[in-house]
Amino acid sequence: MNREARLRAELVAAGERLFRTGLIRGGEGNFSARLDAERFLLTPRGWCKGYLTAGDLLRVPLVGALPVQASSEGLLHQEILQRHQDVAAVLHAHPPNLLRAMRSGCALHPQALYEAQWLQVASVPEHPPGSASLAAEVAEAVGTACLVLLPRHGVVAVGGSVAEALWRLETAELLAFVLGKASP
């Protein structure tokens, strides 16, 4: 299997897993993976990521205009991948426990859970979804964090692979669940 086919399969599997576990629903979320120095794979706008096929993913430019079919958060993925050569995959989801924790003001303390102690977490101010300001702010935060919390809008997890970004996202959701259950 060539690199592109493998990345397509990994993104499809991530979508199935996140959908099955309730970390995304309906048309929520968007994912990307770096193909090479000029292109990346990106999920299409508005599709249920739990039912994607490898052929549904778009091959888009790392620099320049994104196609109209691209995810509404395409700029966010493009900006992160442009600025951070070490990032190979970006996953954006709306995990319910993380959203609940952010809404209630519960800080995510990675040291509270052994499995989460390696997470570097940042939070950005609220920006309109899909905006250039959100893309720039999140890309800046990725300079010091692998997990970026977006008020009222979910989380962005990055990694050196799709599997690493997925692990970080799922671990952050577990951390939010544990901290939420521990709250008075």
Image (cartoon, helix red, strand yellow):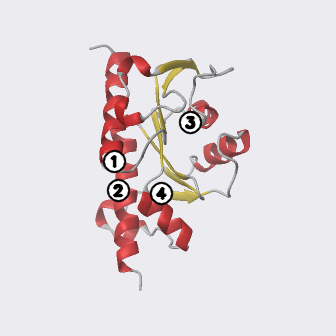
Q: Which mark is residue 120?
A: 4
Tell me which amino acid carries mark 2.
Thr
Of 177 and 47, nearer the camera is 47
**Which quadrant, please, contains the C terminus?**
bottom left
**Residue drawn where x is 42% and y is 45% of the image:** 25
**Residue drawn where x is 73% and y is 44% of the image:** 133
Q: Which residue is denoted by mark 1 in the rendering?
A: 167
Q: Secondary structure at mark 3?
A: loop
Callout 4 crowding tier (Cα within 10 Å): few <14, some 14–19, many ≥20: some
Q: Which residue is denoted by mark 3 in the rendering?
A: 84
Question: Is label 4 or label 2 in front?
Answer: 2
Question: Residue 100 location, x and y as percent?
Answer: 48, 66
Residue 52 as seen in the image, left or right of residue 30: left
Question: Residue 153 location, x and y as percent?
Answer: 57, 53
Distance between the Cα atoms at labels 4 and 1? 13 Å
Q: Secondary structure at mark 2?
A: helix
Callout 1 crowding tier (Cα within 10 Å): few <14, some 14–19, many ≥20: some
Which of marks 2 and 3 precedes in the sequence?
A: 3
